[in-house]
Image (cartoon, rainbow, N blue to C red):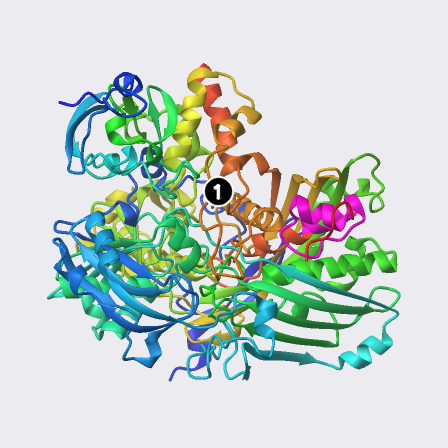
Amino acid sequence: MLNTTPEFIAKAEPDGVNSPTVGPDAVPIAMQVNGVTRTLRAEPSMTLAETLRGPLGLTGTKIACNRGACSACTVWLDGDPVCACMILAIDVGGRSVTTIEGLADGDTLHPVQQAFIDHDALQCGFCTPEMIMSCAALLEHTADPNASEVRAAISGHICRCGTYPHVIAATLDAAKVRRG
Amino acid sequence: MMAEQDTLRTATFPSGIASVGLGTVKRKIPADEPPPLPPNAELTVIGKSFPRPNGRAKVTGAARFTVDLSLPGMLHGRILRSPMPHALVRSIDVAAAARLPGVRAIVTSASPDDPATATLRYISAPVAAVAAVSMAAAEEALHLIRVDYQALPFVAGMQQAREADAPAVHDSATAPAGHPSGFPAAADLPLHGNVRGPSIVRRGDVAQGFAQADVVVEGEYGTQVQTHCCMEPHAILADWRADGLTVYMSTQFTAGVRQELAEAFGLPLTRIRVVVDAMGGGFGSKSSLGNYGRIAVELSRRARAPVRLFLGREEEQMDAGNRPGTWQRLRVGAERDGALTAISLVSYGTAGIGLGAGVGNNAETLYSCPNFEGAQHDVFINAGPGCAMRAPGNTPGGFGLEQAIDELAEKLSIDPLALRDRIDPSPARREERRLGAERIGWQRRWAPGADPGAVKRGLGMAQSLWGANVQTNAACEVRVMRDGSVEVLSSVQDIGTGIGTVLAQTVAEVLGLRPDEITVRIGDTEFPAGGPSYGSRTTASVTPPARTAAWRVQQQLFREAALALNAAAEDLVARDGKILVRNDATRSLTFREAAARLRTDRISAVVSRSDDYAGFRRRMGDAALAQQDLGGVQFAEVTVDTDTGIVRVERVVAVQDCGRPMNPRQIESQVHGGVLMGLSYALFEDRILDGHTGRMVNPNLEQYKLAGPRETPAIDVVILENYQGQSATDAYGIAEPANIATAPAIANAVYNATGVRMRSLPMTPAAVLGALGKIPARS
């Protein structure tokens, strides 16, 4: 099986002499998604977003611009929010992927998810899962954020319905709940 | 025929504005309408901020949007689009594409043999389309389609298009025809070159009015093209089978799409089903089947397999509609005390190859003025067609009008609010001005440009008016099952506004249940037609039949319960999950016990929208305009950095009315959306079309700049409770009126800050510096 870890890729020669040549046909890939090892075959050109939505059936992650401009595809990679449309599936390697489907604890919603419902921090809901991923990631490292930190955390997100005011209020409220 | 006294009864409704003081109004209503609904203060469910029934699905990623759906054997559709702004298709050769493995169907939209389709009039106009087993195969097949284009002269700027020697975009045979309703444009108007119109409205005599005026203001205003930027792209999954067609579509009007499909493909309505579950934003652009929808269905018909087709972001920006750009010249005359004597409006706008670039009716109708003349023109250019976008017409029109009124107030040395108190007949907006002024601290307002320093602060306000639309054939079904479960069914779709919540509240209020005890089944043409979600008409159209249906079902249930309780059905009431005898709470059944006594597995009522109790002002097919208008008043506080030209909106106070507010928090959400779309229109958004190539140069979401979280001001939303006694719920819409006043309120605030009037949008740093004379003004 191909070694596609970032360490391996980072070590590859800049001129590509020692880089593995893969594709265009599908190659086997294994990745940690929401705590489970998933194996699949994907073409090397497939982005993480396409892979999650297609072969893995995790359609909570959306594609709206497909070029890293709107954050509708935000997932966590080792806990950091990233645009899944800007990462190839074969480059995920050993890092763990968390999607919106993996955020709740069983039937118990994450405090940010519950706060989004309570504050009506969603309208059409298309950008909502990813907005939640960014807000929940913020609370992982900033237990008591202010509104400006929430704005910064979601500054890459585009919500055409204009949910930002309720998103900010919901996240501040979720932080309070989480602190207990 | 029955005599009127048998079919009508007189009922007394709450009337007026709650914060001013409520009175009553008597209406003659059909005998089978439910009793008047008391004001919100006396209700337990309606008027309260209950959460959305689909909230959990939306926060967990479980909500299924059209782009998320797939079916066994599904093919992927892609559209080949015109690379030229104006071209004749001399030939199309699809043979190589057809031979590509995985390609299952090809359709051509442009046919060299058909004069009606051989001419392509904008970059990205559909030429042909492919359905294949994978996106990659479909994409590759597009590259194998050989098209011989003959380039034709084109025009991509509105000013150039108006010139006598400009290339003609349409001829009289191909120019779109307009519509008797006047929307998107009036029918039967003359076409001279690329200019269609004018559409003229006259009242009184403007020449005489201006002669009487003590003061006249005159100004030219320009607004840019704005694109809808729905986060979910336009998407359809078409499944053509021998026994019928099922279409899953991201649409604002399931029943309308079904009707269009019936006409386009010659199928009976009974063989077509249109479904939408979660829907990722429309804002006007997903109101109809669209060229892509028709293509996807045709591909499915030919391939005999389901075909999913959605637009990429570039296609979204170039061929999914837009808010037309406009140029307006306004003249307003007034007497010394502010009384208006005349308004004249001339406008030219462009919706690309389409119609609908008028600037609405605010200049004509917002203020009392005996003399008005409006002349509006559509100008064709070689660009993708515009379509309705959140308060079409009135949003660009309001930008001009509300600055002109502000300018008039200054010239008359009258406060802008005091002038509007003088010339605006609406009691709702009077109260909105009062409430808003208090919230924003209007008394702080200073003379224009008086704030010292480089960063100047300003306050401004503007008003909006929007027709209260109603879909007269909107319908709803309410069912009570024998186990006591209740469902409300309608083809109406939730495009993000939360109509499902409001339907559940409406039914729960009648039946004495909680909203979460009502199952909401919507977005499917298998259910009674619920009307469109555009024109801010959804709540007004579908909540009255929902309440009436719930009430009729309850009458049936009461008859069963009355037997068990040994009481008269008319003495029963429903509350807290029980059916009780009025004045004797010891005699009761739970709702579930009452339902268990039903002799059939369910009881059900299907109800269509009744006419407004005081009648409609106007009817247009299945739509009507209520007697009263909707509107609002918005205040903006801005800072303008006169060194950088950056305008920051710090605070917006939006005071809006929508009849009876059904769910205040959801209304607040929609007002946020309207304000932010208006702010984004005011400061950032701009479709930039290159005049040399006819190509949009920013067809994405980063160079097409949208307001984001960092540009979001504090937004105070104040909602009037404005009762009119017009329907079983007396509720009307909010989405569009909340969008109109934002840009002019910001422009008036920028003027207050700087003393410089921004007459065109967007108010970018360069435009502001140009207006301040710090850099050469852009043409």
Relative depth, front residue between B622 and B195: B195
Q: Residues within 10 Å of mark 1 (few under 14, many from 20)?
A: some
Magenta-highlighted stretch: main secondary structure?
A: helix
Answer whether residue B641 is visible to the viewer in this image. yes
Q: Where are the magenta residues, as a range?
A: B745-772
Q: Is residue B360 visible?
A: no
In the rendered image, residue B496, in percent from the top left (x then y), is placed at 41, 48
Q: Circle 1 is placed at which residue position? A: B702
Give the image location of residue A54, x and y in percent.
Answer: 22, 39
Q: Chain of mark 1?
A: B
Q: Position of residue B548 (x, y in %)?
A: 38, 60
Give the quadrant of the C terminus of chain A: top left
Residue B272: image quadrant is bottom left
In the image, is residue B49 above or below residue B255? Answer: above
As drawn, A7 above or below B65 = above
Front position in the image: B663 or B755 = B755
- Relative side of B682 to A71, left or right: right
Name the kind of residue labelled 1 in the image. Answer: Glu
Q: Vertically, is B672 above or below B115?
A: above
In the foreground, A92 or B434: A92
Q: Secondary structure at mark 1?
A: loop
Residue B69 image point, x, y percent: 23, 47
- Report the number of discs: 1
Q: Is residue B615 magenta?
A: no
To which quarter of the image does residue A26 belong? Answer: top left
Q: Nearer the viewer, residue A55 or B261?
A: A55
| Quarter of the image where the N terminus of chain A is located | top left
Q: What residue sits 86% from the left and 59% below the top?
A: B411
| Residue B754 sits inside the magenta stretch | yes
